[in-house]
Every structure is written in C-alpha cells, then in structure tokens.
C-alpha cells in the first residue's frame, strides 16, 4: 500500500499530515503528487471529494518550502483559481491546514466580500492565493496584486469555469503569469473545450484519471419518478423526505428562483431546510452550509453552481427536482452521496418536457435508471440507429430488494400516473405562466388582449382588409418569440446568463 512517505514528501509535511489524521493517500493523490514533484504540467480527471486539493497542494507546498524564497509584498508565488466562492473557501481552508507548521501564508479573494479588506490582506503578502477569476482581475486592476513571480497556476473545476463563461478571464490571467510556470488543471469531465484549454495553457502535460467521466459511485442506487408536473414532484419529494426522517438530503433545482421557492414551501410545511444559490449573500451561504454540515438542518436546496465542488459528508439522498440541462451535472449531483464507502440514493423527477434530458443522462452513463413510479413515456427509448441512441432501452427494471419502503407514490394517486401531453401553444403562450400543461395566469400586453384582437378584426372587415394588419397573427408571433423569455432562443439566453450570475 502506498504511503505519503513513499510519495517523496518531507518530514515536516509528513508530520503535519499525521497531526491532521491523513494516513493513506487517495488514488488521485498517489498518482498526481509524484508527477507534480517532478515538475510536470498535469491534467487530473477526478470527481469532487477524491482529495484533489491535497493532490496539487502538498507537492506545491513542498516545492515552495524547498525553494526558500519569500514573496515580495503584493506578489504571489502560487495561484489557484476556482469557479465559486464556496469552493475557494474550501480549498483555502485545506491549504491553510497543510501550511500550519510552515512560514507560507494562504490568502483568498472572492466576490461578495470587501475588496478593500482583500487589498489590505494582499498588501501584507501571501505566498498562495486562492481566487475566483472575476475578483482577481478587479484586484489586479487596482494594482493590489501582481502575478509576475507566480510559478504555479492551478485551475480547479475547469469544466465548470468554462460553463460559467470564465474563458476570457482565464485568458487574461494566464497572460499575466510567467510562461515558465507549472500549470495543473483539474476537472471532473474532459469535454472538447477542456482539451482545447489544456492545449492552450499546458506544456506536454501528464494525465491522471481516477474515475472515468460519466461514471457515478458504485454504491449509489438511482431511481426515477415519471410525473405530470411540478406539483407532483413536490408531493413525492415531501413524501419520501418524511419516509426517511434520519436522512440528510440535497435537493437540486435548475434555477435560483426555483430553489428559493421550493425551500420556502418545504420550510412552511415543517421541514428543517435551507438553500444556497447565487442570490444569497456570502454570509447566508456559509451559514446554510455550516448548519447542514452540523446537522442543524437535514434538507439543503441548491443550484448546481452554488454547490459545485463542495464536500459535504453524510449525505444519504440526492434529489434531482429538476433534471439538469448538461448531463455531466447529474453525475456531479449524485456524487454528493455514497462517499467514504457508504451507500446512497439518488432520485430524479422527470416531467414530460424533461424526457430528452433523461435520455442524455442515461446515454452518458450507459445505464437505464430504474423506474420508481409513474408511466414510462413511449419516447424514453430511441430506436436502434437513431442519432445518439444506444438501441431500445428497457422500459422498466427491478428496483431490488428493500426498495419498497423508499418508493413514494403520489398522494391520492397510483404508480401509473397518466402522462400529460404538452398543450398546444395558444395565441398568447408567450405571456402565460404554464404549469402542468395548463395556463395559470395571463398578462396581455397593451393592444394584444382578446378585446384588442376583436377590434383589429372588426376594423379589417370594415376596410375590406385593405392594408390592415392581421392583429391576431402578428400578436401570436410577437408574443411567442418577441421577448427574452418567449422563444427558445430567449430561454437559452436566460439560461446562459443564469449560470454566470450564480458564481
């Protein structure tokens, strides 16, 4: 069995690890530490919770201690970039643990905190800086920090940084770091964009991989409930939470608004719950995470970005209240449970308009997720030879012994809930709130309501339709695609903006 001593770490670092209870290196640490010690650029593919911070932090600290140089004020020696405030805090806390018995200093800078206090901290000098890209560039513009002496550049959760649109910030930062630096890139997945990023920033990198992209933990039991809409999702969620009173659950929502709305509903109905998302302040997010870790609350509602990279032990259930648009995000979500050899359960809710997302997830993971309840839609399976398909999928598979106690049926209904077809768009679909296929509210724009349409038609008939505009038809097109949220393109623009705002 490999030990930390076998990896070439010094007695001082080994003593610190022993004091903190580190006994045996994880697979990513055992593979990465020797390569970083040898000075190679590195691509590390590993999921959250595998020990990535120690994999790059320990050899980096070892080499900095051996070098012996102290950083000039406002000039750092190692830069670690991460996509979210929570992940920056987590990385910095781990690194501070590793440098306890050394003269090295670790600093962190994130958005949502006082930039003046961060400038003062940097003025006192730090050797290792952990930062979000946007706040780092703000401080560079203020001349509060320079990167001309940085010898190490670490990009953690690189795939998420690209998803959030940080590529331009990364390019600006990389130009400010010396070319003879050592660059370490860590990512949970390896899409084409990450490969291109690696070729741009890394020099002849070594690659280590401890978990193939798209592979979930072996001990995660996965189930899907096919539902008619949001209300049925909520009822099944509450029922299963009540059936597991000793569990600790993370519930993922696709949007900040959705996460907050669901949290308030669960709180109102008696659950101990909190939420983390981009509209929460840094202090609110930290208090929610601490309460969840300490067991003061047992349900945490989160968006993907806010929860990315956070290591929270003891999560028994992960609920995909909304299926993610990106299949890899599903793997990240369910990876929150079944850690440290424990079992875990991942439950997904799939509405009729989410069938495509479920197919993409199953294709990525090369599995058929077991059906817990609901009628399996006919379009869940793709015929053999269809684009992106794996052949016809099984409509249903056994859930295994002992799962019956966890299966939650919609209250007052049956497991075979009929599939609700999506309603055809009405002339005013762009202005209606549609839930479960039914219009809930109409907010007609001035000149586009039913009365206005009738007036347009009467005027057109009176004029013999000479040069008159067909009010209803133009109103239809204007409503369905005219505003930012009416058409598919507007929805995509909103989704892209949402991801960036979350950071």
Image (spheres, rainbow, N blue to C red):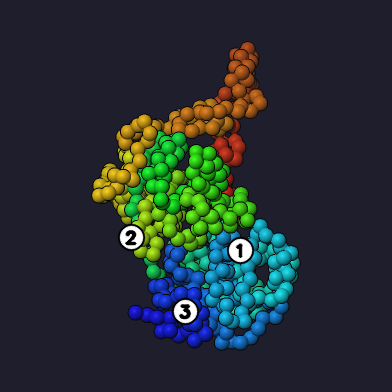
- Evaluate whether residue 401 shows in this view: yes
Give the percent coordinates (x, y) of residue 167.
Answer: 58, 62
Give the percent coordinates (x, y) of residue 72.
Answer: 70, 80
For mark 2, give the secondary structure: loop
Give the percent coordinates (x, y) of residue 46.
Answer: 43, 66
**Are circles 3 and 2 on residues that touch, CB within 8 Å?**
no
For mark 1, give the secondary structure: loop
Taking the spot 41% from the left edge, 43% from the top edge, the residue there is 242
Q: Quadrant of the N terminus?
A: bottom left
For mark 3, give the secondary structure: helix
Image position of 211 with respect to 105: above or below: above
Q: Residues within 10 Å of mark 3 (few under 14, many from 20)?
A: few
Q: Quadrant of the C terminus?
A: bottom right
Taking the spot 48% from the left edge, 82% from the top edge, the residue there is 14
Taking the spot 49% from the left edge, 75% from the top edge, the residue there is 20
The label number, if any, that marks residue 218 in the structure image: 2
Q: Of marks 3 and 2, which one's residue comes earlier in the chain? A: 3
Q: Mark 3 and mark 2: span between their CA atoms?
A: 30 Å
In the image shown, does 374 or 18 lie closer to the viewer? 18
Q: Nearer the viewer, mark 2 or mark 1?
A: 2
Single out the residue that lies furthest toward the top: 462
Q: Nearer the viewer, mark 3 or mark 2?
A: 3
Taking the spot 51% from the left edge, 79% from the top edge, the residue there is 16
> Is residue 272 toward the left or the right of residue 371 in the image?
right
**Are circles 3 and 1 on residues that touch, CB within 8 Å?**
no
**Are circles 2 and 1 on residues that touch, CB within 8 Å?**
no
Q: Which residue is mark 1?
A: 132
Q: Which residue is mark 3?
A: 18
Q: Mark 3 and mark 1: span between their CA atoms?
A: 31 Å
Q: Residues within 10 Å of mark 2 (few under 14, many from 20)?
A: few
Image position of 419 with respect to 294: above or below: above
Give the percent coordinates (x, y) of residue 281.
Answer: 63, 53
């Amino acid at each position: 069995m490999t030990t930390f001593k076998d990896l070439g770490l010094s007695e001082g670092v080994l003593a610190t690890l022993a004091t903190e209870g580190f006994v045996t290196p994880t697979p990513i640490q055992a593979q990465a530490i020797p390569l970083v010690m040898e000075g190679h650029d590195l691509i590390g593919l590993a999921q959250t919770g595998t020990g990535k911070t120690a994999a790059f932090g320990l050899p980096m600290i070892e080499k900095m201690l051996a070098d012996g140089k102290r950083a000039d004020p406002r000039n750092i020696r190692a830069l670690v970039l991460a996509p979210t405030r929570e992940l920056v805090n987590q990385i910095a806390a781990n690194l501070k643990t590793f440098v306890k018995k050394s003269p090295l200093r670790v600093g962190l800078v994130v958005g949502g905190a006082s930039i003046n206090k961060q400038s003062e901290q940097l003025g006192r000098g730090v050797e290792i800086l952990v930062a979000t890209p946007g706040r780092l560039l703000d401080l560079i513009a203020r001349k509060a920090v320079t990167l001309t002496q940085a010898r190490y550049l670490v990009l953690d959760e690189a795939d998420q940084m690209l998803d959030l649109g940080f590529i331009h910030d990364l390019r600006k930062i990389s130009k400010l770091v010396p070319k003879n630096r050592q660059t370490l890139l860590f990512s949970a997945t390896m899409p084409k964009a990450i490969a291109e990023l690696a070729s741009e920033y890394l020099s002849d990198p070594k690659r280590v991989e401890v978990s193939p992209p798209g592979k979930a933990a072996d001990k995660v039991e996965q189930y899907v409930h096919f539902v008619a809409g949001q209300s049925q999702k909520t009822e099944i969620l509450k029922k299963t939470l009540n059936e597991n009173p000793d569990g600790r659950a993370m519930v993922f929502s696709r949007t900040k608004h959705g996460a907050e709305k669901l949290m308030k509903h669960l709180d109102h109905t008696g659950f101990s719950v909190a939420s983390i998302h981009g509209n929460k302040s840094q202090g609110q997010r930290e208090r929610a995470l601490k309460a969840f870790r300490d067991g003061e609350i047992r349900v945490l509602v989160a968006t993907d970005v806010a929860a990315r990279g956070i290591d929270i032990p003891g999560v028994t259930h992960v609920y995909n209240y909304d299926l993610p648009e990106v299949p890899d995000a599903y793997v990240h979500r369910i990876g929150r449970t079944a850690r440290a050899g424990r079992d875990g359960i991942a439950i997904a809710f799939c509405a009729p308009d989410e069938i495509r997302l479920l197919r993409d997830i199953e294709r990525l993971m090369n599995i058929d997720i077991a059906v817990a309840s609901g009628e399996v839609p006919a379009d869940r399976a793709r015929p053999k030879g269809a684009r992106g398909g794996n052949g016809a999928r099984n409509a249903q598979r056994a859930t295994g012994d002992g799962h019956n106690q966890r299966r939650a049926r919609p209250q007052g209904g049956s497991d075979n809930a009929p599939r609700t077809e999506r309603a055809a768009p009405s002339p005013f679909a762009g202005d209606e709130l549609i839930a479960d296929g039914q219009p809930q509210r109409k907010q007609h724009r001035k000149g586009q309501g039913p009365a206005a349409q009738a007036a347009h038609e009467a005027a057109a008939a009176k004029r013999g339709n000479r040069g008159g505009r067909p009010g209803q038809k133009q109103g239809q097109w204007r409503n369905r695609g005219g505003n930012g949220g009416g058409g598919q393109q507007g929805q995509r623009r909103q989704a892209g903006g949402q991801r960036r705002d979350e950071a």
